[in-house]
Amino acid sequence: MASALQAREMVPAKVNNHIHTPYSFSAFESVGEAVDMALKENVKILGINDFYVTDGYEEFIGKCTARGIFPLLNIELIGISQEEQKQGIRVNDPNNPGRTYISGKGLAHPSIMPGPQREKLERVIGESNRQVTAMVTLLNDWFTRQGVDIRLSTGEIMRDLAVNLLRERHVAKMVRLKVEASAGNDRDYFEILTRIYGGIAPGKERGDIAGTEEELRARLLKSGAPAFVPEDEKAFLPLEEITGMIRDAGGIPTYPLLLDGAGGGVTEFEADRERLLEVLQSRGFRSVEFIPLRNRPEMLRDYVEFFYGNGFSVSFGTEHNTTAMRPLTVSCLAGSPLDRELVRISYLGAAVVAAHQYRVAREGADYEPWPRGEMEKLGDSVFRHYFGNFDTGTGD
């Protein structure tokens, strides 16, 4: 069956179907900043993909529709695949066997997530906030012992940097901001950081904001560091619960492939693509996503074409879940652009999500499944209708 784009000769709209916003943690100071950047780069289809929360949906939809950008509504959750954990197999977290990141694409809005599922999610958010609160307490004690006149509070972090959800990255950012505010010059800056690091000089330049925050996390908050607080395993739900939660919220469970994004090595779970396909299908996945910026073009294309050729829909994004500000235009490792075929597949993946959102809104989450090709065609029509209305000024 010909795809929507094979049936029509056209250049597909640019897509980025995975960005984080300040509702979890983001390179962007606001949702509006992210959407404005998308507009400048001519990214016409944009997907919010925050950790654990959908709080940003309303604002995101408003900002996107005001600028003629199509909003896709996603979420990212972290769970445990107990089968892989028992065998010591790394899935898509390169450091923790069994730990698995899962996206949900095209969630319903307003939310249709059942109360018990919502309560589970709230407990996970609460655990993250408790972990960060414990880190802040340990950091304040550490700063006192090191003679550093900096104090943190979770209230201040929540007020200035976060929205309901606290994460380790918020702590590192707040420490960096307070060091900057305390330092009158470069000498003061490096002296304060050296004291914070227990007498060890920092390894990052002052202007390297993202690098400094990663160094703060590594030296203060990670295992063996003075403010390390272990994650409670109860905060990570079994994989089956997570995929069920996504479906109950009207979304499409989507497996994010890491591939060579962790220093060049591929995890045991992802190394054999045929086996990976078999396992994902057995667990009910029909959708995968990639963050191409961390992958070599040849490996990315190999896996993308393999999964697309086996009936999966495929999404691409940039994350933007650190302080590092990079373009929203999706590219591969070292900035290599996506080739024509990858751009086409990315658009068709977004079309499936748009069609899903459309059908859930009109038929409910239990709508009769259609073949992928039909969903691609419907999504393409949804996009053309949306952009056509915006171009003519109707905006509905």
Image: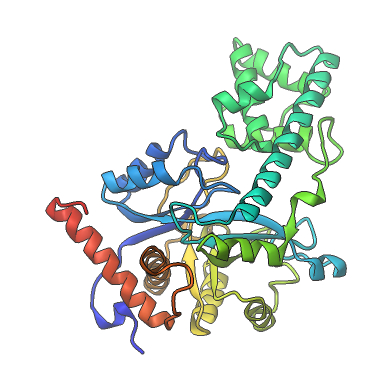
Of 73 and 241, nearer the camera is 241
* Residue 303 horizontal/vertical position (percent): 56, 75
Q: Residue at x 73, y 11 (%)?
A: 149
Residue 111 visible in the picture: yes
Quadrant housing residue 285: bottom right
Quadrant housing residue 346: bottom left
* Residue 131 horizontal/vertical position (percent): 76, 36
Of 389 and 118, nearer the camera is 118
* Residue 6 horizontal/vertical position (percent): 30, 82
Q: Residue furthest bottom?
A: 1
Q: Residue at x 51, y 38 (%)?
A: 22
In the rendered image, the vertical position of residue 164 relative to residue 190, given as above or below: below
Q: Residue at x 63, y 65 (%)?
A: 243
* Residue 7 horizontal/vertical position (percent): 26, 83
Specify how the rendered protein is coloured.
rainbow
Of 327 and 164, nearer the camera is 164
Badge count: 0
Residue 265 visible in the picture: no
In the rendered image, the vertical position of residue 82 relative to residue 4, given as above or below: above
Q: Is residue 30 left or right of residue 386?
A: right
Q: Is residue 268 left or right of residue 16?
A: right
Q: Residue furthest front?
A: 115
Quadrant occupied by the N terminus = bottom left
Quadrant occupied by the C terminus = bottom left
In the rendered image, the vertical position of residue 26 relative to residue 295, given as above or below: above
